[in-house]
Image (spheres, rainbow, N blue to C red):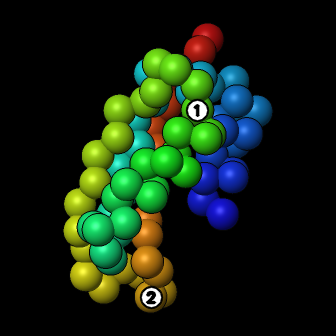
Amino acid sequence: MCMTSTPGGVTIYGWSDVGCRSVLAGSDIGEWQEFNEVHRGFFEPPYPARSALGADGLALGARVDVECMAVFAG
């Protein structure tokens, strides 16, 4: 869900996905590769920088929390 709303939400407000960065906080860092493959499906090269960290006790029992940053295209 979070990844399906990110690119559209970014571009609709005049922001660019070029130069953005994503940070993943996951309850199982072993799923990083799977997340990375999904993430690549939402962006085109050059891919945004990606970081990951393991987290215990994410809000509302979530398994993953994704933070995306973008630059203003204007």
Residue 43 image label = 1
Residue 65 higher or lower than 6, as above or below: below
Q: Quadrant of residue 26?
A: bottom left
Left or right of 41? Residue 66 is left
Amino acid type of the residue that numbered disc 2 sits on in the rendered structure: Gly
* Residue 21, picture quadrant: top left
- Give the x, y percent position of residue 68: 46, 44
Say whether residue 52 is visible: yes
Give the vertical position of 71 relative to 28 (above or below). above
Element type where label 2 sits in the image: helix
Query: In the rendered view of the protein, which quadrant contains the N terminus?
Result: bottom right
Q: Is residue 13 shown above or below 42?
A: above
**Count of residue discs:** 2
Q: Secondary structure at mark 1?
A: loop
Front in this rendered view, residue 33 or 26? 33
Query: Badge 2: how crowded within 10 Å, few (<14), some, or many (20+)?
Result: few
Please give the residue where the numbered disc 2 appears in the rendered image: 61
Decide if residue 16 is on the left or right side of residue 61. Answer: right
Q: Quick one: label 2 or label 1, which is nearer the N terminus?
A: 1
**Residue at point 25% right, 73% down?**
55
